[in-house]
Image: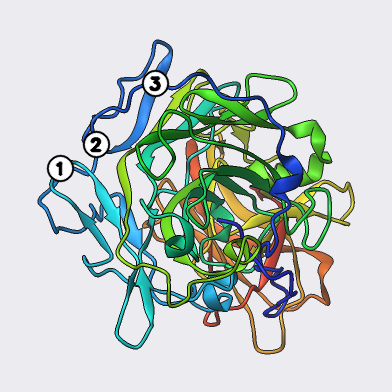
Amino acid sequence: MSETSGIPRAVGRRRYSVRRALVAAIGTLGLAAVAAATGVAPADASAPAPSSGWSQVFLDDFDGAAGSGVNTSNWQYDTGTSYPGGAAGWGTGEVETMTSSTSNVALDGNGNLLITPRRDGSGNWTSGRIETKRTDFQPPAGGKLRVQARIQLPNVTGAAAKGYWPAFWMLGAPFRGNYWNWPSVGELDIMENVQGLNTNWSTVHCGTNPGGPCNETTGIGGSTSCTGTSCQAGFHTYAMEWDRSTSPEEIRFYLDGVNFHTVKANQVDATTWANATNHGYFIILNVAMGGGFPGAFGGGPDGGTEPGHPMTVDYVQVLQSGGGGTTPPPTGGSRDAYGTIQAESYDSQSGTTTESTTDTGGGQDLGYVSNGDWALYKGVDFGSTPATQFKARVASGAPDGVSGLIEVRLDSRSNAPIGSFAVGNTGGWQTWRTVPANISSVTGKHDVYLTFSSGQPADFVNVNWFGFAH
């Protein structure tokens, strides 16, 4: 669900969260036609069993009583008109207020989720937006990830569909809790549709905005049409495969099993691709009303727009194939505690992103770090002689009064820190210094968490590398 407006916004040093206003998808048409029409399966079809070589890592079949909400073990509601502290109108210019009300987001009792936009007597729109609690969806090293959903789009067309914008999409995990680092952290639009048109748009967003290697605010997109029945009149399966078994790595989009758009890593520079893909993603389902994308095809909702037409979702399923886990093991599964551990080589993280560094040796650093963020480094081997010191290469351009703690925890983020140090402004976000700290004695092999805490919501540190000493 691509952000819109193209107007730069910033809070402190956080990057643009605005997303595309005018899609140039028209210019990316002309893709191969899809296969011949097939019959439409029942609305309550179960998710398919994984094919040979694939394993299922997430499924919601939306089974439950009619009128009940979604499973909050799987999903969280986005409510209001923005993320906390994020761009207004969800950064897209859309006009609805998102709610957790079952009038907007509910199960139908037949194995489907309904996300229904509604308009009150004063002309105000409400709708629904949910996203997975998990943020770790990415292919294993050398493997593939497939994310798919069977969906019937709001069954409304023509003037009555003006302003409708249903979507099934994904955002890079570093966006959660930051909300100002788009598009560098990546966005994968598996299905977008506007104005009741019989068209599915799929897009990769990355790089910088506006322009940049990914042609923002448009992104690298393609489109195709539903066959047999229109996207509005029947169910169709929308899917994305992210393939790390190929060289170059590629992301493929499918409609009813037909690949109609592919984006390869060598279409952009290596840093842009790494910033967009060296982390997990979370999944979003929503129906927006108005905004830049509908605006590019005739405008937002008006008096002739009919409320009450839901996007109906039969299931959302995530599969993986090959490799050894849900995240690529960047160090082969074991790290030397007394060597240099690159901060961007995490096994998983929340709230951060990677960026190019000007520090000695170049490469990337772990950036945009603020209160509550964390990064995990698996299999750090401290040996039999106790480690008693920790050091990290850090930089900060935080404003006056903004500082925080870098904490080291072992094996669980809920365990007490074994050591920490405070960091404030070092003179700039690329002005680096090495800071030491004492830690409790550690031996053996552990998973190491770097956790970050601050009394302020603003970013307070970048980390280039860290290590331990006796």
Mark closest to the chain's N terminus, 2 or 1: 2
Given residues 2 and 137, the one toward you in this image is: 2
The crowding category of the residue bearing disc 1, from other C-alpha atoms within 10 Å (few below 14, some 14 to 19, many at least 20), is: some
Residue 367 or residue 160, whichever sits in front:
160
Earlier-in-chain disc, 3 versus 2: 3
Gap between marks 1 and 3, in whole Å? Answer: 23 Å
Binning the other alpha carbons within 10 Å of mark 3 as few (below 14), some (14 to 19) or many (20 upward) gives: few
Q: How is the structure coloured here? A: rainbow
Count up the numbered dots. 3
- Secondary structure at numbered mark 2: loop
Alpha carbons under labels 3 and 2: distance apart: 15 Å
470 in relation to 37, above or below: below
Q: Residue 110 carries which label?
A: 1
**Element type at mark 3:** loop
Q: Where is residue 3 in the image (x, y as percent from the top left)?
A: 62, 63
**Residue 38 — which label?**
3
Whether residues under marks 2 and 1 lie with C-beta atoms below 8 angstroms apart, the answer is: yes
Cα distance, mark 2 to mark 1? Answer: 8 Å
Amino acid type of the residue tagged 1 in the rendering: Asn
Q: Which mark is residue 43?
A: 2
Identify which residue is drawn at 78% across, 48% down.
214
Return the x and y of residue 289 as percentages of the image width and height. Answer: 47, 68
